[in-house]
Image: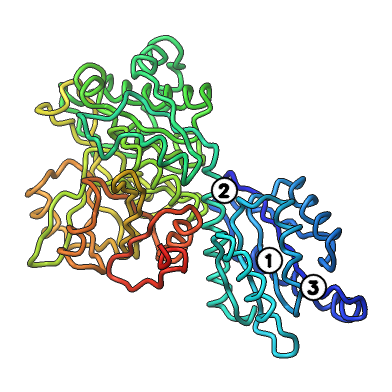
Amino acid sequence: MKDTPIGIAMLNDEREHVWRENNPENERVVQQWMDIIKGKVKNVDGSAPQVVPASRIITGTRLAQQMGEELRRAGCRSVIMCYNVWNFPFLVWPFLNTLGRNVPVLSLSNNNGKFPGNVGLLATDGALRQAGIRTHRITGDMDDAKVQEQLADWVRAAQAVTTIRNEVYGLYGGHSMGMETGYWHLTALLKCLGVTARQVDQLWLLKVMENEVDEAEVDKGHAWFEELLGDRLLYDGNMLTAETLKTQLRLYLAMNMVNEEKGFDFCGLKGQRELTEHVCLGDVAEMLMNDPYDWNGPKESVVCATEADANAAVTMQLLKYLTGGLPTLFMDVRLYHPDRDLWDWCNSGNHASWYAARSFEPAKNFEKITLHPALEFYFKAGGASVEFDAAPGPMTFARLGIWDEKPYMAIIPGESVELPPEESRQLKDQTDPTWPHVWAKLECSFDEFLNVFPCNHVQGVPGDRVRALTMLCEIAGIKPIVLGRERLEPVWETMG
């Protein structure tokens, strides 16, 4: 998975008799923090972000400039400023001005009683904030698991922001059915995240499907589905046939090819109405894009948002980076059951099959999956709809929204719950039993959710990612609105 190098540096006292005495200990502390990051921040594919230490503890102006240049040349896109002793605060400026003032900054200190590291942190970080630089601060014992988790969350947040910068979103077909909450907000997203979009007509995909897709690959994929699903592949001779399923597989292969050709890092597929009425339903192709595997084995999950919902795609891409590469969910906010305080979040679209059992072995997930014929009422071209109940477990749900051209992120901690089969069947009959469902319990109330949530599509990932996602937003200048939990606003928000 893509990532960006993280710089790590320490400032010290400029008095030679002081730094000669304490630098060996300072070097040890920097190395320990590096070891913690390497141990705590692992991606799904086994990789970890590169942590680049400044080769010397900073004790003077020229050395500060040299270390900033060293990290800049190493490609560092974020920086951790370590504090262990008193330092001369002004040294941060020749260092940071050389490295680049737009990098996310974490001020990090272990709670050291012998030396005034916390004093150095507050004096130096305070200078940065005086100049309007948003920073985060962490202080605590480096052996404390909670401190280590907080550090890992910041690293994930900084990685998400610095990795999505300069990425390109492939927008296939424009916003679907005029859903303006899913339209690409160019200026707002360039300002906060540095990400842009290129729109390509869906005709391009159709021509690649017709002229460039390898039919041997289509047959291989079709055989894989038949082997995994057996009699849960519900051919009906009309909407779902071997050929309509193969058309969906051609669409998947074509999206991969065009993404590679155009340099798209993530994408969204309009689908309705051109594809769904004249080519095929996009569900299977979107599922495969978001999955961490296909018939050729393990692969990186590639975010693909149904109905080309751009704000959903950006949310999903950020959540993917926050989790080290896990698939991300895209759901309709469909139905609330007040008697159960339970949400039914379902849509005809891209629930990665991974969520059926949260397994990286496709067979374990597909044991719980059925492919149904697409609903002819909506999707006249046919193909398969994917149906399963998402596996239970803690979740973080989120959505990027826009208020008066200003971005904000709704963040909702909760869980996906498992229902008894008969109860699940009865509830699914109230919406659509041929689509994937998440039975969602939220920490916030129905009224709180309804008052704040920006649109009809919600995204999610496993685990409690609230702190990491909040840090991400604070780094990027996106207003985080956490539902169901109190949040301590940083000074740059309270000062307006």
Percent x, y of residue 198: 44, 26
| Left or right of 175, for residue 57 | right
Q: How far, Cα to Cα, is label 3 from label 2?
A: 28 Å
- What residue do we see at 12% from left, 26% from top? 376
In the image, residue 330 above or below residue 90: above
Q: Residues within 10 Å of mark 3 (few under 14, many from 20)?
A: many
In the image, residue 241 above or below residue 210: below
Q: Amino acid at mark 1?
A: Met
Q: Which residue is mark 2?
A: 162
Q: How far, Cα to Cα, is label 1 from label 3?
A: 11 Å
Which label belongs to residue 81? 1
Percent x, y of residue 123: 66, 75
- Image quarter of the C terminus: bottom left
Q: Amino acid at mark 3?
A: Asn
- What residue do we see at 88% from left, 80% from top? 18
Q: Residues within 10 Å of mark 1 (few under 14, many from 20)?
A: many
Residue lying farthest bottom? 113
Q: Nearer the viewer, mark 2 or mark 1?
A: 1
Whether label 3 touches label 2, CB < 8 Å: no
Q: Amino acid at mark 2?
A: Thr
Q: Which residue is mark 3?
A: 12
- What residue do we see at 52% from left, 53% from top? 324
Whether label 1 touches label 3, CB < 8 Å: no
| Disc nearer the start of the sequence (2/1) | 1
Q: How many badges with numbers are in the image?
A: 3
Percent x, y of residue 178: 21, 30
| Disc nearer the start of the sequence (1/3) | 3
- Nearest the eye: 365 or 163: 163
Element type at marker 3?
loop
Q: How far, Cα to Cα, is label 2 from label 1?
A: 17 Å
Q: Nearer the viewer, mark 3 or mark 2?
A: 3
